[in-house]
Amino acid sequence: MRKRVGMTLFFILISASILLDHGASGVGSDKVSVSVMEGDSVTLFTGVDTNQQEKIKWYFNDIRIAQINGDLSCNCTDVQCNEGTERFRDRLKLDHQTGSLTITNIRNTDSGEYVLKIINNNNNDMTFNVSVHAVPDAVMDKMKRKSVKEGESVILDPGEIRKPNDVMTWYFYEILITEITGDQSKICTDVQCKERFRDRLKLDHQTGSLTIMNIRNTDSGVYKLQINNSRFSIIKSFDVALIG
């Protein structure tokens, strides 16, 4: 009898341990760390397609900043969710299909914990720890605003080491010009891009940096680097201008 009681207690303890490790009632949790520079844009992915049976809510440091109701008849971001809140005014975008949240022109004061709550039959929580690195204006200008003379080369450096699962894509005025996926890369898949930058682009596979050689007046403009993985996406912008 004593042996049977002991075995029962053993199984109760094991069951309790499993519930504590994985969450009771189907509730799951996950944590993601995101590091960005001031002025970048970042998208935090939910990894789901919304339907009329679920609600999605986003919180920043325990303050609700965005939500979608299951029937999409009621959704809000920042000021609409919290009257009088000015922190994210006009800088939040909510994808109504996935519930993913985009923060544009991110600031140092936006650093903190973003919690995603998906409310359905299997409630799920996900936490994004976002760190925004403040960069002195002089350094930011040097990194993101490039002034060069015709015939010179310019390096657009994202300022970080590329992770193995990152997909890095460069755009010039929305035209895809380069992409790194895993160990593979391609330059100028677009016909228009091939003509404009033929044999003048170099990619650094370790950092994702883009070098434009023998630069021309027609190369002036905004270049964007999109860094994607399964949990978040970061967009960095670079302004290239020719002088003289």
Image (tube, rainbow, N blue to C red):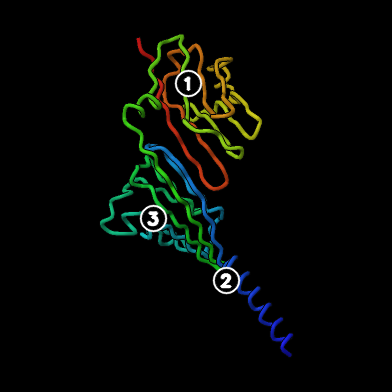
| Residue corresponding to mark 1 | 155
Q: Residues within 10 Å of mark 2 (few under 14, many from 20)?
A: few
Q: Residues within 10 Å of mark 3 (few under 14, many from 20)?
A: some
| Quarter occupied by the N terminus | bottom right
Identity of the amino acid at label 1? Ile
Q: Residues within 10 Å of mark 1 (few under 14, many from 20)?
A: some
Q: Sequence order check: which comes first, mark 2 or mark 1?
A: 2
Q: Measuring from the top left, give residue 4's x and y in whole percent.
A: 73, 86
Question: In the drawing, what numbered circle is on residue 24?
Answer: 2
Identity of the amino acid at label 3? Phe
Residue shown at 28% from the left, 51% from the top = 86
- Alpha carbon distance from label 3 to label 2: 24 Å
Q: Where 31 falls versus 3 (above or below)? A: above
Question: In the drawing, what numbered circle is on residue 143?
Answer: none
Q: Secondary structure at mark 2?
A: helix
Total labels drawn: 3
Q: Measuring from the top left, give residue 208's x and y in whole percent.
A: 54, 29
Give the image quarter of residue 183.
top right
Towards the viewer: 139 or 89: 139
Q: Sequence order check: which comes first, mark 3 or mark 1?
A: 3
Q: Measuring from the top left, give residue 11's x and y in whole percent.
A: 68, 77
- Alpha carbon distance from label 3 to label 1: 36 Å
| Residue corresponding to mark 3 | 60
Residue 53 showing in the rendered view? no
Q: Where 226 falls versus 64 (above or below)? A: above
Residue shown at 63% from the left, 76% from the top = 13
Give the image quarter of residue 148.
top left
Identity of the amino acid at label 2? Ala
